[in-house]
Amino acid sequence: MNSETVVHVASGKVREIFELDDERLLLVASDRISTFDVVLPTEITDKGRVLTGLSAFWFARTREIVPNHLLGVRPDGRSTEARRLRMLPIECVVRGYLAGSGWKDYERTGSTSGHPLPAGLEDSARLPEPIFTPATKAQVGHDENIDRDQAAELVGPERLEEVERVAIELYSHGADHAAARGIILADTKFEFGLDADDRLVLGDEALTPDSSRFWPADEYSPGRTQTSFDKQYVRDYCESLGWNKTAPGPELPADVVEGTRARYVEAFERLTEVSFDDYLDDPSSVLR
């Protein structure tokens, strides 16, 4: 950061948030990694730069679908200047495949977030069409899947209709782009806010390995957990330890750190078609 006056206002699992002025925030993506809502003691080198660069890439290419908060990426490659928004109190998840908590809901009830689904689907099965599955924003513990009626109580029915339409359009755009580069976008989470004129604006991050499940298409096989470009690699390692998923989390060995970094960087390069080294030299390269 330069010598301008900034005020630290919040810390997230990954990001530090600073106030630049009444209208702008500075979001700094760390290399921290969380799994099962616990921040682990080991960082993943360059992870914050991957998240920042990929988000900027998608923000630059989805403005015609919905405005976003991006004002610029700073030369360090991990800091984003963003418009201040009033964030909506829901996580906006779109699923094109049945995985994670969606799969667990389906195993238990035959549906997820109020969406009845066909019988006999397997783990990681492709859904007939993308579905919008909102979730709560938990201050402590896990986000919880909710149905549309519960989401409408939180944001209003008209706003929810807009959010659902935009989220599915963003997912479809990202899924088509990824598919052309040999990657399946299984699901993703968006966060939206409102600007001073009550217009819907995409915020936080977009279509990154932290907010999405990315699978290599040539290795996809339903009926099992998929190889992934996201932090599933870290989740799988942590689960193999018999860890109880409460703080403190386990340290990660060097091979898991290196393997996870390689997956994040590969996702970045395949999706942006920009070499990660070129991004480090010039973060604005993802905006062109």
Image (cartoon, grey):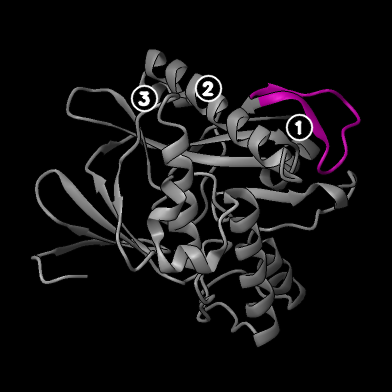
Please tell me whether residue 120 belongs to the stretch shown in magenta: yes
Specify whether 180 is left or right of 188.
right
**Secondary structure state at the residue bearing disc 2:** helix
Query: What residue range appears in magenta?
Result: 114-130
**What's the amino acid at mark 2?**
Arg
Q: Residue at x 66, y 86 (%)?
A: 253
Q: Is residue 149 left or right of residue 21?
A: right
Residue 34 in view in this figure = no
88 relative to 8 in the view: left or right: right
Mark-to-mark CA distance, 3 and 1: 26 Å
- Residue 1: tell me if it is visible: yes
The residue pinned by badge 2 equals 148
Which amino acid type is shown beneath numbered disc 3? Val
Sort mark 2 into few (<14), some (14-19) or many (20+) by Cα contacts within 10 Å. Answer: many
Q: Quadrant of the N terminus?
A: bottom left
Amino acid marked by disc 1 = Thr
Q: Position of residue 259 (x, y in %)?
A: 69, 74
Between marks 2 and 1 in the image, the one whose residue lies nearer the viewer: 2
The residue to which callout 1 is attached is 109
Q: Are marks 3 and 2 in contact (CB under 8 Å)?
A: no
The residue at the point 19 percent across, 22 percent down is 197
Viewer-nearest of discs 3 and 1: 3
Q: Is residue 2 left or right of residue 60?
A: left
> Which residue is drawn at the image coordinates 42% and 24% (left, top)?
64
Looking at marks 2 and 1 on the same chain, the residue that comes earlier in the sequence is marked by: 1
182 is higher (above) or lower (below) than 15: above
Residue 130 drawn at (x, y percent): 67, 26
- In the picture of the structure, the residue carrying the numbered disc 3 is 155
For the point 57% across and 25% down, the residue is 168
Q: Magenta span has 176? A: no
